[in-house]
Amino acid sequence: MVTTCPRPVPPGTRQDGDALPWTRNDGLVAVGAGVVDLVGFTLASQSDHGDVPVAGCLLAVVAALPLLARRRAPVLALTAVLLLNTGLNLTMPTLTHFGAAAVVTLYTVVRLRNAAVAAALSVAAVVALVNPASWPRPSTVDLLGNTAAAAIVVVAATVVNHWQRDIEANRRLLADRAVAAERRRIARELHDIVAHHITTMQLMAGGARANLARDPEVAREALVQLEGSGRMALREMRQLLDVLRAGDEAEDEPTAPQPGIADLERIIAESCRAGLPTTLDVDGRERPLPPSVGLTVFRIVQESLTNARKYAGEARAHVRLSYEPDGVALEITDDGTGAGTGLMGAGAAPGSGYGLVGMRERAALHGGTLEAGPLDETGFRVAARLPLAADEAALR
């Protein structure tokens, strides 16, 4: 085990509670709508009748309770609100009809259901919330007022739907671009690895051919073919890289292979110097890994620690590398309690971060998997496993 910083504090145990069937936001919306409708009913009753009935106040508040289920069952929630408001109007007719609870539930129906359902329930809301004292011939003012209110709600919900669809389309486009950019970067790095070894092979084959003490014709012919194959492979790789780099900014060719497993201690030390105490554990029998696998391990650790420094706040990080018989496993955790959500940053849902996209692309390149998500109480975890082929696993 290599330790460069104090060991991180282990995350606490999970304490699961019974989940409510509604969210906190749903509760706040229901309370807000109930308060608004209660105030409106109180003012209207005082103005129209000179008193405020307690039963009417209770019914106005109860009419907002279906908002707790508006996301799970928007049609039932709106139906319940309309029935309760109809009962309120029959009990104490007032000039206030299209209340906050009706507005919120109708808005939710338009957002979550198809156009036919939304249109039918909008018409039902307009009719159900007309002052019952005017039936069977409701006044034009009541109908126009309710129609205008319903139309405003429907238009607002439709505009928000279009806006969110545009946001989602842009998000998918940016994610696709991030994937393409990461694949180009991976291709460049793999090219640098392969080119380094092929160049070495070419130089060694050429030197062996030029300095043979004896000249067996068969060996000479084999070395000539080896040199020619290496030169051809290098030329084809460069042609491939030229295609992948089309439109990219010019960059200097690296003069050394890309980093790998041997560089983990260096990046752990850099993380500590940057203010994130980090430890590294290595389990299993260490053995050489293919350069591309070592590079993937290094990049996953690098990206995870970078995000932890950005978003985890006052935290500690822990990196565990495990050598398995048929692969290598990697786990990076932090115990951050900052404004973000740990390694992936503030508000990022699993799979939404572009850094996570890049890490998953790298793992998938080797037929591996990568999981990322928040820990039970505080912190974040990134875990990857990269399988090795039989000949790669046998490297010593």
Image (cartoon, rainbow, N blue to C red):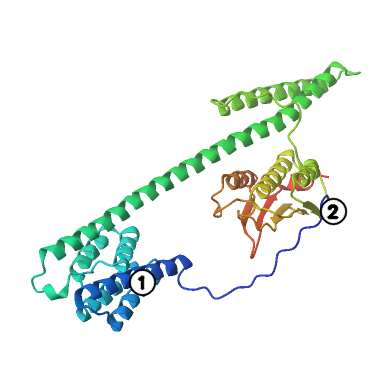
> Is there any visible trace of residue 111 in the rendered image?
yes
Image coords of residue 255 (percent x, y):
75, 26
Which quarter of the picture shows residue 192? top right
Which element is circle 1 on?
Answer: helix
Residue drawn at (74%, 22%), measured in percent from left and top? Answer: 225
Q: Residues within 10 Å of mark 1 (few under 14, many from 20)?
A: many
Q: Is residue 5 left or right of residue 355?
A: right
- Give 65 or 196, whichever is nearer the viewer: 65
- Residue 72 visible to the viewer: no
Depth order, front residue of 380/311? 311
Direction left: furthest residue: 137
Q: Is residue 19 left or right of residue 153?
A: right
* Tag nearer the camera, 1 or 2: 1
Q: Which residue shows up at 71% across the image and 64% down it?
A: 11
Residue 279 rendering spot, x and y as whole percentages: 79, 52
Q: Which residue is mark 1?
A: 34
Q: Residue 267 occupies which quadrant of the picture?
A: top right
Please tell me whether residue 144 is drawn above or below residue 246 in the rendered image: below
Q: Amino acid at mark 1?
A: Gly
Tag 2 residue: 1
Circle 2 SS class: loop
Q: Earlier in the sequence, mark 1 or mark 2?
A: 2
